[in-house]
Amino acid sequence: MPPASTGASTLTVAASTQSSPVTDTTDRLAPGRPGYRRMSFALFAAGVATFALLYSTQALLPAVSASFGATAGQASWTVSAATGALALCVLPMSALSERFGRRQMMTASLVIAVTVGLFVPFAPSLGWLIALRAVQGAALAGLPASAMAYLAEEVRPKALVAAIGLFVAGNSIGGMSGRILTGWVAQLWGWRAALGAVGLLAVACAVVFHFMIPRARHFTPGTLNPKALARTVGSHLANPLLRRLYAIGALFMTVFGAVYTVIGYRLVEAPFNLPQGVVGSIFLVYLVGTVSSAAAGRLVARLGRRGALYLAVSTTAAGLLLSLGDQLAAVLLGLVLITAGFFAGHAVASSSVSRTATTGRAQASALYQSAYYLGSSAGGTLGAVAFHTGGWAGTVALGLLAVLGVVSITLYGTRAARAKRLRPAAAVPVQN
């Protein structure tokens, strides 16, 4: 993988030109420096709110199905609509962040998403619930890519993987706490009260973010130029390494979206027959994702980026196969391995995008987020369809197919890098 750019990372939408040649990064945030801990805590809170809101209905799908008389595939759209809308809106939102600022875009996204979240519990029909969730996903689109760009600009390059890992760890905590909270509240008072509880959790996180996030010191606003944006996006899509990273993020999220959309249906049925609250508590395994994403920097240091990806994908595949067992312990251990592998792979791939793109980092991150959440949307819907037609084995088969895609892409990248190293240098004419 190419090293991170040491140039200035203040980027504009018209960033098809080269970055500033400034190489001094000593005034950026790093562990032990003032503001780093506040920044980490603020973005951790933003990550919690993002995943808690984005996947708020996932653990409640069996209850939503029962309430509206819907199939698993129909109810899964309450998740897929949110992730799909985010995927479609993240690129234009990242362009707005180039004009109005990363911090401002993240704040606005949280405020709108939290406000919509307070209306979601009152949806009168499944169609209204899906529509509100789509609006919520579109609002959240301004946060992920802006957060990645903010970190790339404000954090020292050597600390970037660890900083992004903490943001991703916030995602895992949000996903876990939201699902556990909704599971137990739904068991006591119903799924609508559960969604209201998630909305209040997100309000608290938004307040923490607003008061803790440091002012951006390395951002320079740009102009909204659609042609320049198209050139920047085109240059990223023309980069073979970035294309591979986008595909890896999408495939990892296909596995994750399929598994966690369907697992609730499996666990409330025979032979497990678990109550809603216990099913929600299953998501405690997200703590494993918190650890593995935060440890991504150490994995890369030891194994290299491709080595870390191989470890992540092998762990995910092992978890999928183990989850086929009918013993609850086997299913839980399988979920642990799937979660650990997914969050480690996501942290490595997303940080690699930020390091690879030397210009237009917001757009590079936005394209990754688009691919990532399209993978989530596809995984949720296809996973539910596979479960309906082939049971849990069908969902696992879909996940293994996506895992095989990650392996193939990573192997191709490894061979391409090896061939590039072995390629003889062009002969240089000798000057007389």
Image (cartoon, grey):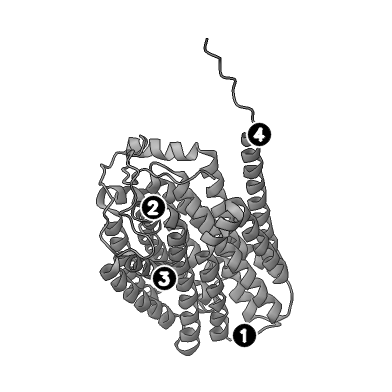
Dot 3 crowding, Cα within 10 Å, few <14, some 14–19, many 20+: many
Is 173 rendered above or below residue 216?
below
Q: Which residue is mark 1?
A: 274
Labels 2 and 1 touching (C-beta < 8 A): no
The front one of 427 and 397 is 427
Q: What is the three-letter code of the residue carrying label 2?
A: Ala
Inter-mark Cα distance, 4 to 2 = 32 Å
Q: Residue at x 55, y 14 (%)?
A: 430
Measured along the vertical axis of the image, is residue 339 above or below residue 27? below
| Residue tagged 3 | 48
The percent coordinates of residue 409 (x first, y second) are 63, 47
Mark 1, other Cα within 10 Å: few <14 / some 14–19 / many ≥20: some
Q: Position of residue 220 (x, y in %)?
A: 26, 47
Quadrant, the N terminus:
top right
- Mark 2, residue position: 152
Mark 3 or 4, which is nearer the eye? 4
Up the image or down, 315 lies above or below 26; here it is below
On screen, residue 16 versus residue 394, left or right, reads left
| First of labels 2, 3 by sequence position | 3
Between disc 1 and disc 3, whose residue precedes?
3
- The residue closer to the viewer here, 321 or 188, is 321
Q: How many marks?
A: 4
- Looking at marks 3 and 4 on the same chain, the residue that comes earlier in the sequence is marked by 3
Q: Which mark is residue 171?
A: none
Ranked by sequence position, the earlier of labels 4 and 1 is 1
Neighbourhood count class around disc 2 (C-alpha, 10 Å): few under 14, some 14–19, many 20 upward: many
